[in-house]
Image (cartoon, rainbow, N blue to C red):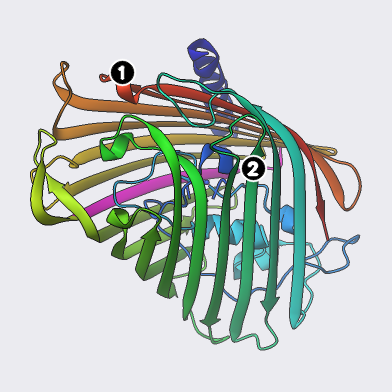
């Protein structure tokens, strides 16, 4: 499996380098694979607000906004690709991916509009869309057990719908819903897992202004299996949570190719285990620069603070500090480069690196530095679409000790493959595979897991 992982990574890097050389002339989370537990992670803070759009259609389109623009799976809200919850109890949706999910490439700037030969139509006042997927799959370790590996077949269902209103070009309002769930056949204590997300936004952007601002409201419910190694527990278990957030945002378009966004958030999260209940605040700034029509750079910086209701502080050796409640703070930065082309073999390639630093207000048990990288690749031809994603993350803890191997360390890696084939204007079939593995100098925190599934998707 490790050889396969390295082979796929090398293949993607070769394609990436080959396209850049030829061109001398970016996602966690919302990758919503519930069984893998995509814990909607605010460690991937939202990046963009959605601006009023002029939507484009091809000659065969009826003008309805299509959820098939979502060829980027929401990495719930990726890294929604990791099954490990952030020690902060994070849980949020990446709006950069939500923009792509809802609108695809509809957010054209003025330069793109001038270059496009596609007919631009006046937006409808109300624009609804719905998508439903149904499939069957198998996992060899859906509970992410380090020692006991229980396999199971499952059915999966996913639905996405939204309603967007833009009767006045100075305003944009929308309501978005995402639901996803799995039912396992062979796990009597863990039959169901799921995520439900509801988000609404209202944004004001005057036609002749390069500024916009608005407000988002979001609620997320999940019922999933978690790997708890970040929290010092060498096992997985099912967790239920409800999180509500209010998110004001501001956006400034510096010029036709550069956009700056600033966003804050206030969240309240309630678990079925009250000790994990918390409040969090976050502020972040992001910038997006379109170098040319093929290359886009994105950068982001964020700071997040979490106050727990009951979780007690810990010393570096893991012992509890009685009657003192834990707070954590985390800052991080991210840089990504996306290359798009008309080549059917490399429609899009995105490379992303990130750095995060977390500290607690206690003895340093939770303190760590996290570095990670992700490489994704998309191909299109005729009725086929293929996506591959490779991810790697390294956790270096400052003080936390293992039983015999010194300071605790952990590495995570993942692979995703999605293949879809269009059957007709409303139906498509799909195959999905996800592999993830955690390595550590403590055996209690090592596991690997695969998810395979086949199904069909319908949209209207």
What count of labels does the image hold? Answer: 2
Crowd band around label 2 with a 10 angstrom C-alpha radius: few (<14), some (14–19), many (20+): many
Residue 152 lies left or right of residue 392; in this view the side is right
Q: Identify the main secondary structure in magenta.
A: strand
Q: Which residue is mark 1?
A: 443
Q: Secondary structure at mark 1?
A: helix
Residue found at x 56% / y 61%: 197
Do tag 2 and tag 1 residues touch (Cβ < 8 Å)? no
Which image quadrant is residue 285 in? bottom left
Name the spot of residue 330 as percent of width and height, x first: 24, 52
Closer-to-camera residue (295/97): 97
How far apart are labels 2 and 1 at the CA level? 29 Å
Check the image and report above or below for 407 versus 168: above
The x and y percentages for residue 221 are 51, 59
Q: Nearer the viewer, residue 172 or 193?
A: 193
Q: Which residues are magenta?
A: 328-345
Residue 182 is tagged as 2
Judged left or right of residue 85, residue 390 is right
- Indicate whether residue 398 is drawn in magenta: no
The picture places residue 344, in percent across and down from the top left corner, at 74, 36
Q: Taking 254 as reference, is 97 above or below it?
A: above
Q: Is residue 42 above or below residue 184?
A: below
Residue at disc 2, secondary structure: strand
Q: Earlier in the sequence, mark 2 or mark 1?
A: 2
Residue 282: x and y in percent read 30, 64
Quadrant for the C terminus in the image? bottom right
């Amino acid at each position: 499996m490790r050889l396969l992982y390295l082979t796929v990574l090398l293949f993607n890097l070769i394609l990436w380098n080959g396209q850049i050389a030829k061109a001398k002339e970016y996602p966690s989370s919302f990758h919503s694979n519930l069984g893998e537990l995509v814990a909607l992670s605010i460690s991937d803070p939202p990046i963009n607000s959605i601006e009023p759009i002029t939507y484009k259609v091809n000659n065969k389109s009826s003008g309805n906004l299509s959820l098939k623009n979502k060829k980027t799976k929401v990495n719930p809200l990726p890294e929604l690709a990791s099954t490990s919850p952030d020690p902060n109890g994070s849980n949020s949706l990446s709006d950069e991916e939500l923009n792509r999910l809802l609108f695809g490439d509809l957010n054209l700037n003025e330069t793109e509009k001038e270059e496009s030969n596609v007919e631009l139509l006046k937006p409808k006042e109300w624009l609804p869309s719905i998508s439903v997927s149904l499939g069957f799959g198998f996992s060899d370790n859906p509970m992410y057990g380090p020692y006991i590996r229980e396999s199971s077949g499952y059915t999966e269902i996913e639905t996405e719908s939204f309603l967007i209103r833009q009767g006045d070009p100075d305003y944009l309002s929308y309501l978005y819903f995402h639901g996803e769930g799995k039912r396992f056949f062979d796990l009597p204590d863990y039959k169901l897992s799921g995520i439900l997300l509801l988000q609404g936004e209202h944004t004001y952007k005057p036609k002749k202004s390069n500024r916009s601002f608005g407000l988002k409201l979001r609620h997320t419910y999940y019922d999933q299996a978690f790997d708890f190694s970040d929290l010092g527990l060498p096992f997985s278990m099912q967790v239920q949570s409800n999180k509500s957030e209010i998110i004001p945002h501001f956006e400034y378009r510096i010029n036709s190719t550069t956009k700056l966004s600033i966003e804050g958030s206030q969240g309240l999260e309630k678990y079925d285990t009250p000790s994990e209940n918390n409040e969090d605040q976050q502020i972040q700034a992001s910038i997006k620069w379109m170098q040319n029509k093929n290359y886009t750079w994105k950068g982001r910086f964020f700071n997040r603070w979490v106050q727990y209701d009951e979780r007690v502080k810990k010393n570096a050796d893991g012992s509890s500090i009685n009657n003192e409640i834990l707070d954590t703070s985390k800052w991080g930065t991210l840089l990504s480069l996306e290359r798009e082309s008309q080549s059917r073999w490399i429609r899009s390639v995105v490379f992303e690196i990130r750095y995060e630093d977390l500290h607690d207000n206690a003895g340093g048990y939770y303190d760590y530095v996290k570095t990670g990288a992700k490489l994704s690749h998309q191909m299109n031809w005729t009725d086929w679409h293929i996506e591959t994603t490779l991810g790697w993350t390294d956790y270096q803890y400052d003080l936390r000790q293992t039983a015999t191997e010194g300071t605790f360390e952990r590495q995570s890696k993942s692979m995703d493959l999605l293949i879809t084939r269009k059957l007709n204007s409303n139906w498509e079939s799909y195959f999905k595979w996800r592999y993830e593995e955690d390595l550590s100098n403590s055996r209690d925190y090592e596991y690997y897991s695969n998810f395979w599934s086949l199904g069909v998707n319908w949209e209207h």
